[in-house]
Amino acid sequence: MTVARTDPPAVARPEATSGCNECNEALEAARNSLAAVRRFAVVAESALANGDGRRALAALHDLHDVARLDGERRLERPARGS
C-alpha cells in the first residue's frame, strides 16, 4: 500500500505564472490562438465530410494564417532581460 506524503517538500516551488503579467498575457494569447485553430479545423473537417472542398480549403487557409500570425508575434516579442 502506498501512502501519500503529508510533510511539505524541502523546497517550495512557486507557481509558474503567479503575478507574472508577461506570462499571463502569453498564456492568454496561446489559448486564443489554439481556440481559433481548433475552430478552423472543425470547420475544415465538417466541410470535407460534406464534400465542400472550397469551404474546407478556405478554413485551412484561415488556420494557416492564424498559425503564421502567432509565430510572427512570438518573433516580434523582445527577449527577456533586454
Image (tube, helix red, strand yellow):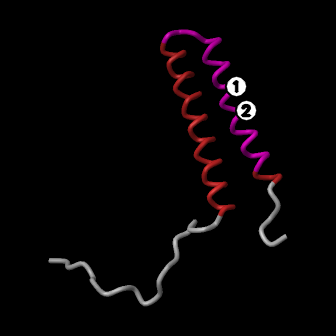
Residue 74, compared with residue 6, is above or below; it is: above
Q: Which mark is residue 40?
A: none
**Image quadrant occupied by the C terminus:** bottom right
The answer to which of 65 and 80 lies nearer the viewer is: 80
**Across the whole image, how many numbered discs are drawn on residues?**
2
Residue 23, how many percent across, how many down?
64, 61
> Does the residue at mark 1 contact the one at mark 2 (Cβ under 8 Å)?
yes
Q: Is 55 in the magenta?
A: yes
Residue 64, compared with residue 50, is above or below; it is: below
Extent of the magenta region = 50-73
Instruction: Give residue 10's quadrant in the image.
Output: bottom left
Q: Which mark is residue 65?
A: 2
**Image quadrant occupied by the N terminus:** bottom left
Residue 37, compared with residue 25, is above or below; it is: above
Q: Which residue is mark 1?
A: 61
Residue 61, compared with residue 78, is above or below; it is: above
* Residue closest to the far top: 51
The answer to which of 23 and 41 lies nearer the viewer is: 23
Task: Identify which residue is drawn at 47% across, 87% down.
Answer: 11
Dot 2, how many residues are within 10 Å of its Cα: few (below 14), some (14-19), or many (20+)?
few
The answer to which of 55 and 80 lies nearer the viewer is: 80
Residue 44, how many percent across, how many down?
57, 22
Amino acid bearing label 1: His
Task: Identify which residue is drawn at 61% across, 54% down.
Answer: 27
For the residues marked 1 and 2, what is the alpha-carbon distance in whole angstroms?
6 Å
Q: Please indicate whether residue 10 sits to the left or right of residue 37 in the image.
A: left
Task: Identify which residue is drawn at 69% across, 61% down.
Answer: 22
Please tell me whether the stretch drawn in magenta is mainly helix, strand or loop: helix
Q: Is 42 in the magenta?
A: no
Task: Identify which residue is drawn at 52% across, 71% down.
Answer: 15
Amino acid bearing label 2: Asp
